[in-house]
């Protein structure tokens, strides 16, 4: 059974900085902690100590939440997890600084721990994350963006965090087998891509079991992966109409109900192929891992169900 | 070695296969695109060029249709680059002292030679980069044609051999019919530039490449044609048209580079635009357009009228120059809307740059006609 690791403690941050801990209490109290749970899943098969697992979980949650603080301000999103976003509740300046502070804290913690490859890998991941965010921002209002171009953005942005979750425990363990490390990278990339595509489907109210707000991306002027797939063959006029849709029903009316359904089936079929490749790579990973770590393969095999198909 | 789940009794059925470098059929899988009697295509290579290299392949179902194969070959042959020859050929046809049949024969042979040689060189380059692992470090590298093709790498290589042989045959025929002695200095300088480009790496290549493109598609090409077609074109006209053609070709290739600028660092390529950066590249391309238009306008306004009294030439030149201005206007407008190295507008810009290149060559043709 996976615990909800408490990654945030007010003792780790200076009390003399006004509102900082209040902001972090809000931020960390509401998350599902999915990434830290993924860290636990991967780490338990490698016999890492609870201290090591805590460090990894805290690192990824700090980085993830730092990116959320900055993202909400960049996108001017007013809600985060159904509550006012930090930049609105406090100030934009505090939101930016709080995000920066979390990243600085990550560097402090990892450098104190002393595993240089892990520190380097984490720094590269943060760099990729920021690059992906920058490129994604440059694509806002670009109505002609293609799925393969968005995949490059997601490879840098979303997938980098998932790659880290799957690979960092092995880096911490000083794994030397380069094939295992590159396989873990590839698995993380695939699972990150699937997660992002599923999130993009949610924006069109597909498999939206949690009733999250829809069409947020489109209304912000950003064509997400399913939007790009759907609008691939649109002419310029239709793309403008697509951009102006206010509801999912507007989208279905523009595209046609049956065409929308057909596009969704095709999109799912493409991702089913990706999942098959993921399973194949897992088999390869299983061939490489020592007996005591092979349980990891079965745990990773279960990921596509909740991440892509949104089945718990 | 692992295959995907789904092995059925009595029949080995698998979708993917991952082979280690040490596997006895590894090189065959990579080269021939075959494993266990099935056609396969490379998905990903791990630990490339190390002792622990592995590659994952996907089984390809069904045979390719002839149209798909044809399209794959066109992609790798970059046919439009061959088409760069057509307008210069037309320019020199109209000023040639050779008979029409001779001109058509030479023009046809030259186009065929260019197509076969450039295609075969591209195929060899892509094939050996793929096999050596250079283009397998990341699958965003290398030839899209080889990666997405229905043809196996070996089939591609055989097509390369065929094209190269056809290039040799057409060039031998040309050599036997026409004396290329006078072109020896042009051939030698072109060969020198190409060799320099092939051996120079890094930032220096970023400088050599635009100079090579300008010289090879401009002055060297036009000088060569004027000799081959025994052209009566004056030195001034030759200079103008070769300069404009060189600048135009350079402009086109820089546009293509711009759409690949994001991956240049990953590929460790010495692309000029990757050194000056995305923002300055947009300014450079706009300036390039303005420079070309300025040269043509100066020529058209100050030099052309003095030497030409033919109203048809003046009319055709005016129309084609106006076309160049129109295309330039759309281009500059469009480039102003490009805000990302991944923007699809960059791909559309390549098409516009191609159109601009031809419009200025057309203007050159009518001005020299």
Image (spheres, grey):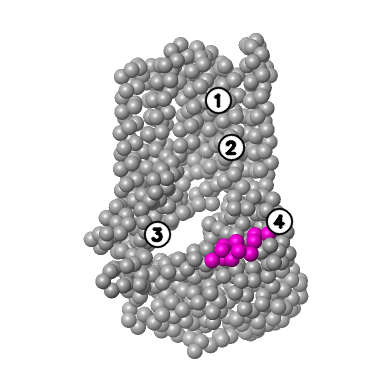
Could you say where residue A282 lies in the image, as x and y percent from the top left? 39, 72
Query: Of label 1 and label 2, which has the lower sequence position?
Result: 1
Per the image, the residue denoted by label 3 is: B43
Q: In this figure, which residue is indicated by the disc labeled 1?
A: B243
Rounded to the nearest whole Å, what is the CA distance between mark 1 and mark 4?
45 Å
CA distance separating discs 3 and 1: 44 Å
Helix or strand or loop: what does disc 1 sit on? helix
Q: Residue at x 23, y 61 (%)?
A: B24
Between the C-alphas of marks 3 and 2, the distance is 33 Å
- In the displayed orientation, state which residue is furthest to the left: B24
Nearer mark to the viewer, of 1 and 4:
4
Q: CA distance from mark 4 to mark 3?
A: 37 Å
> Of callouts 3 and 2, which one flags the residue occurring earlier in the amino acid sequence?
3
| Chain letter behind tag 1 | B
Which segment is the magenta one? A254-265
Res B75 visible? yes
Q: Which one is earlier in the sequence, the residue at label 3 or at label 1?
A: 3
Relative to A95, is B259 above or below?
above
| Chain bearing mark 3 | B
């Amino acid at each position: 059974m996976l615990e909800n690791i408490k990654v945030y403690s007010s003792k780790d941050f200076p009390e003399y900085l006004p509102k900082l801990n209040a902001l972090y209490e809000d931020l960390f109290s509401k998350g599902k902690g999915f990434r830290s749970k993924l860290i636990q899943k991967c780490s338990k098969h490698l016999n890492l100590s609870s201290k090591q697992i805590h460090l990894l979980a805290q690192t990824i949650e700090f980085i993830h939440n730092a990116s959320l603080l900055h993202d909400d301000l960049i996108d001017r999103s007013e809600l985060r997890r159904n509550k006012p976003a930090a930049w609105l509740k406090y100030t934009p300046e505090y939101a930016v600084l709080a995000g920066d502070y979390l990243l600085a804290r990550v560097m402090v913690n990892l450098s104190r721990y002393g595993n240089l490859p892990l520190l380097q890998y984490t720094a590269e991941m943060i760099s990729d994350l920021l690059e992906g965010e920058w490129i994604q921002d440059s694509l806002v209002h670009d109505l002609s963006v293609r799925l393969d171009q968005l995949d490059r953005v997601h490879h840098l942005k979303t997938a980098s965090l998932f790659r880290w979750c799957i690979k960092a425990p092995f880096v911490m363990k000083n794994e030397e087998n380069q094939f295992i490390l590159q396989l873990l990278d590839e698995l993380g990339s695939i699972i990150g891509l699937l997660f992002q595509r599923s999130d993009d489907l949610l924006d069109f109210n597909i498999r939206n079991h949690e009733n999250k707000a829809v069409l947020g991306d489109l209304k912000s002027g950003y064509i997400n992966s399913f939007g790009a797939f759907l609008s691939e063959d649109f002419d310029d006029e239709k793309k403008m109409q697509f951009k102006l849709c206010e509801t999912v029903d507007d989208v279905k009316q523009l595209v046609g109900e049956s065409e929308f359904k057909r596009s969704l089936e095709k999109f799912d079929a493409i991702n089913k192929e990706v999942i098959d490749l993921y399973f194949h790579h897992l088999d390869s990973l299983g061939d490489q891992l020592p007996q005591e770590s092979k349980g990891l393969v079965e745990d990773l095999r279960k990921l596509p169900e909740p991440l892509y198909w949104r089945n718990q | 070695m692992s295959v995907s789940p789904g092995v059925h009794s009595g029949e080995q059925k698998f979708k993917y296969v991952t082979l280690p470098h040490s596997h006895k059929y590894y090189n065959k899988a990579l080269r021939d695109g075959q494993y266990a009697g099935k056609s396969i295509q490379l998905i990903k290579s791990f630990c490339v060029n190390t002792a622990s290299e592995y590659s994952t392949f996907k089984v390809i179902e069904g045979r390719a249709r002839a149209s798909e194969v044809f399209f794959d070959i066109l992609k790798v042959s970059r046919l439009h680059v061959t088409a760069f020859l057509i307008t210069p050929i037309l320019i020199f046809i109209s000023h040639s002292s050779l008979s029409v049949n001779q001109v058509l024969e030479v023009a046809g042979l030259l186009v065929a030679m260019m197509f076969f040689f450039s295609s075969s060189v591209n195929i060899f380059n892509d094939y050996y980069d793929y096999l050596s692992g250079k283009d397998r470090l990341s699958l965003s590298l290398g030839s899209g044609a080889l990666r997405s093709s229905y043809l196996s790498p070996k089939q591609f290589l055989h097509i390369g051999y065929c094209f190269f042989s056809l290039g040799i045959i057409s060039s031998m025929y040309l050599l036997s019919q026409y004396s290329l002695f006078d072109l020896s200095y042009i051939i030698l300088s072109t060969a020198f530039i190409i060799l320099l480009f092939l051996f120079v790496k890094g930032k220096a290549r970023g400088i050599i490449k635009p100079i090579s493109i300008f010289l090879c598609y401009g002055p060297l090409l036009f000088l060569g044609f004027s000799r081959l077609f025994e052209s009566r074109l004056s030195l001034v006209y030759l200079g103008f048209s070769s300069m404009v053609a060189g600048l135009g070709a350079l402009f086109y290739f820089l546009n293509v580079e711009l759409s690949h600028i994001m991956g240049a660092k990953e590929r460790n390529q010495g692309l000029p635009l990757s050194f000056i950066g995305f923002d300055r590249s947009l300014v450079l391309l706009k300036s390039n357009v303005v420079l070309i238009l300025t040269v043509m306008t100066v020529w058209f306004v100050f030099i052309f009228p003095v030497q030409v009294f033919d109203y048809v030439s003046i009319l055709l030149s005016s129309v084609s120059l106006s076309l160049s201005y129109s295309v330039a206007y759309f281009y500059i407008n469009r480039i102003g809307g490009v805000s990302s190295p991944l923007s699809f507008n960059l791909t559309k810009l390549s098409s516009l740059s191609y159109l601009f290149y031809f419009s200025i060559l057309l203007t050159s043709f009518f001005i020299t006609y």
